[in-house]
Image (cartoon, coloured by chain):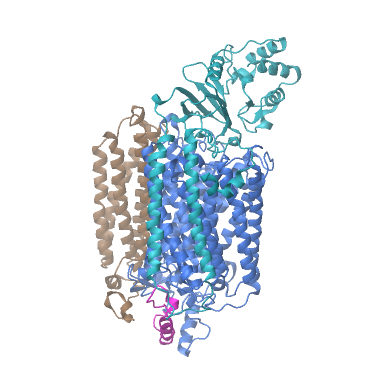
Amino acid sequence: MAVATPPTPTAGERVDRLELMWQSRPGVLGWLTTTDHKKIGLLYFWATLVFFAAGGVEALLIRTQLSQPNEKLVSPNTYDQLFTMHGITMIFFFIIPMSTGAFGNYLIPLMIGARDMAFPRMNALSFWLFAASGIFIYTSLFLGIAPNAGWFNYVPLANRQFDTGRNIDFYSLGIIFNSISSTLTAGQFIVTIFKSRAPGMSLNRMPLFCFAYLAASLGLLFALPVLSADTILLFLDRNVGTHFFDVAHGGSALLWQHLFWFFGHPEVYILIVPAMGIATSIIPAFTQRKMVAFPLVAIAELLVVFIGFGVWAHHMFATGMPTISLVFFAAATAMVVIPSTIQVFAWCWSMVTGTARFRTPLLFIAGFIFMFVTGGLTGIMFLAIPFDQQVTDTYFVIAHFHYIIFGAAVFPLFGGMYYWFPKVTGKLYYELPGQISFWILFVGTNLLFFPMHIVGLLGMPRRVYTYSDGLGWTAYNLAETIGGYVTLVGILLLLGNLAASYFRGAPAGPDPWHGPTLEWATSSPPPDYDFPVIPKVTSAYPNWDPADRQEDRRKLAEGVLVLDEGHEQVATSPVDGLFAEIVEMPHESPWPIILALTVSLVFTMLVLQKFGVAAVMAVLCVLALLGWHSKEPQES
Amino acid sequence: MTDYVAGGRRLDEVPRTTEAAEALAVSRALRARLGPPAACWGMLILIASEGMLFAAFIATYYYLRFTSPEWPQDGLPAPKVLVPLILVGCLIATSVPMQLASRAARGGRLVATRLFLLAALVVQSGYFAYEVHDFQDQLRKFDIGRNAYSSIYYTLLGADHAHVALGILFNLWLLGKLARGLTTYRANATQAIAWYWHAVNLITLAVIGTLLSANV
Amino acid sequence: MRRLLVLAPAVLFLSGCRRAQNSLEPRSHQSHVIANLFWWMMGGAWIGLALVVFLLLLSRARANRRGFGRDTEGLKPAERPGWYVVVGAGIAMPIVLLSTLFVIADLFVIRTTEAPAKSATRLTVQVIGHQWWWEVRYRGTDAVTANEIHIPVRTPVRLEVRSDDVIHSFWVPELNRKIDLEPGTTNAIELDADRVGRYRGQCAEFCGLQHAHMGMYVFVDSRAAFRRWLAHEAKPAAAPESALARRGARMFATGSCATCHTIHGTSATSNVGPDLTHVAGRTTLAAVTIDNDEQNLAAWIAHSQSIKPGNEMPDIELRGARLDAVVAYLRGLK
């Protein structure tokens, strides 16, 4: 339902008033003070692409260093910072913010028929905190003191005794800083999903994309604090003289690992579940059929994160824990496979029984399924404890998780970029370069990651800055490096295609794909207020209900549910999605970026060990919060 | 269309709750509201997050305990039982005036709200002041950097005190806002802050219980 | 035979390489059962992957068959078969397969690879991990060496491991799975090699700058050869035989060398670095980084930092005749 030609004069007046209510400031100031979920989504998109490039450069440096034995491209010190920052960047600064901050922010309100998130200013705060935390941690790399003990940063190596500089302090503080942003985003999604859905959208009519994001958000909410606790304990050990991880004074080295992996395992499901949500959006659109076994898929998305909280010690099978504990965790790991197999067969059967159109988005989803299953199968091998104990900490496990992460998180993100490109830009992308970019990426990533299985079985451990000749590893490493560069070509082609399509693509119209969900029921790109009329929903595929969309057009003419008396939004009941009240939403505000700035100052003072000054900066944060809460909705 | 309106209302009966800016309007608007506002949901999120943080610290306490040959380590004394329990009791009791304040605000009774908040604040501040004094006192007896036991003891206790302090700041802010009258926003805030205090009280009970379990 | 049938592509990959640290060339009962487990799992994995690839190709074959646009009536696909597929292939089949794998691997195979009972083994070797070398002690004797472990063939040996600093991981894939070395606790693993030979391993837990150069050799000797070796290792150091070597011995004992190294029978008794009592009998230096010959030994002493940058041994200010003396002394410590 586009807004281009409103049906009647009074409807036109209403649309004009809506435009006025939701108008944003022009220029840079508009972007700095925005609370519009779409603008924030775009800010996240650009920022995470920058971090993706950084992580990619780190990866290529690693791969080039490893292309030959005894290569001297980088020193061991630099190498250790590179592989650590690669892991941290890709996980915390690319995948999570791209999938939640960019895709989640842009699409969730559109899919649930809302005008914005439940806490728009907090949404902006999430972005500015994320950007600031990225600058914070990358400052350490530019200063040559980046974290260097791996992304999971085991103690005692990360203790002050063995890592004397500020590297690990950048790690602890950077992680905590970043987790504030992600926690706020997670909370945002949970409340929005429960409170802001369109009338009639009971939970069983909510798109699977939103179920996936709900699952990921719940995962983030309950996992991140444990990581924060772990890094707080490490910061205290390193700076205040506590002994949590100091065996000589009653501490424990394994304590770090337990706390870390309690976060770390749910984290990997958090990485892939939003991407699975993207897959469950693309498949119905490109097969023009409803998802097979919708309720099972929805439950599976939630279950995989829930069960994922119970398997953490499978990362610790070689630590010498008693056999009975290992067996318990292996059993839990077996259980967590089931929700994934449910989804894989639901996706495949939907594709087989629908009318598949293998445009670029669906190609990426097919590639995703292939890579996810490959990575999942090697993951299943890890539940055999003796085998895990043979290949853990080798390139076999690097192969496993890159098939999962690149295949199951990144491929759907690429597919999603193509799928929603018309919606965000109003233009169509060029199809042939799109397909070519897929195939180059598919070949490149398989060439890059498959040989790692073999070289791990041949005895190559992880995190080695070089290796000896004569161990049978050289040819595989060279092949992997070539694969890395092929992958680079694929990524450049993909981004170049999107850029060229942005400037010269054909107009897309509101609904080029006959998509099933509500974002396709408004114009491309959507207006600031998303929907001129709050949509009514009677099924899980609202854009495939022509009668309801007709009724929306009629309501616009009659002025029903247009909500143009202010900057207004609907609040509905949590489960049944019944229309409960009308709430006035905050509009643009400078406080999010101001608060993010004061928080950055706190963390900067902490890493410089100026604790008194940090406390003063914290007072500034409190002042910013007071300013934030000074104006109330009825005053705006 | 009315099928999709909560509470069996008509479409034009759905309330605009954020507008109310004086006591009577607030009580009318909030009576019409069918569930907690977004502010309370947001506070639940904060509570869940902080709750998990404390769960991690408490898990750390027990992990260190059960992997140590003796506890407390190095023959340090286990904490006293009676005085901490009495203090926790006083703190938990403040949930009552906080909840009463929340209901008074939603019912439009501004004076009652302020009085209940003030009563809670007095007890909470007294508790906090005593705890700060006691914390410094204990640090003189054994330092945080003594061993893993002292590390987790002071970290767990300190984190709890920090959350009590935050709650006191919330109450001060709220009293400041309520000094200028009642609005939906302020009533929502009272309700959310009451939930915060219920959570902090429960967490404090868990923390003190954990620390006192060294006596067992 | 079954291996080749199931894994033709993998065998093509793996053939033609000189393998030295290969988990798929098992030389002990433990590695054998793990390798077998792998081959079976991999066979199953290829079948699973083939099934999914088949479904994807099938969807490609059936693509575009009804043209663009959505069917709202008539050709609507029936929903019940979809539920059967998802429940059958997505729930029932995985439960059966995973349970089978779990029982076999984690209730049965694991008994072979667990830490051995003390009574089940006939020799105990202690390995203490340091940044970036392995200290090796033979319990009940005075034998102390570094980075190169000798064990008798077809004898269950208990390896007790712990760390002196950060977490390391002992891993000789051809003989058994890996076990972490942690400060403050001792873990154990069994080595029981089928045949005589030299097996290479490497630290498998990132432990700092030179994690990549923390290798080790396990020499599996015949029982008689092992007894001779152990008896020899337990003896104090051989006396220097030439004047040059005697000069080197004096320089060693009075210079900086003795602040870090032990040579039994001399006044050098520090434990910071590896024990050098029988250093000339080792085949490599710096934890299997360079071969142990005269030139490498001299290079290591004079500029170890350019061979293994960041390692704990500083470059020693010795050149010319003085260096030759120390080298000659050490080369005599067989």
Decide which of C323, A244 is in the foreground and name it: C323
Tell me what hue chain B is rendered in: brown
Q: Residue at x 54, y 52 (%)?
A: A402
Would you place residue C172 above or below residue A62 in this image? Answer: above
- In the image, is residue A561 part of the stretch drawn in magenta? yes
Residue A424 lies in what quarter of the image?
bottom right
Q: Residue at x 62, y 71 (%)?
A: A431
Q: Is residue A439 visible?
A: yes
Residue A111: percent from left, percent from top: 45, 71
Residue A53 lies in what quarter of the image?
bottom right
Q: Residue at x 55, y 53 (%)?
A: A90
Q: Which quadrant: the C terminus of chain C?
A: top right
Residue A197: percent from left, percent from top: 39, 71
Would you place residue A567 above or below residue A366 in this image? Answer: below
The magenta segment is A533-562
Which chain is rendered cyan in the image? C
Which chain is rendered blue in the image? A
Would you place residue A348 above or below residue C98 in this image? Answer: below
Residue A350: percent from left, percent from top: 46, 68
Residue B139: percent from left, percent from top: 37, 34
Q: Residue at x 55, y 55 (%)?
A: A406
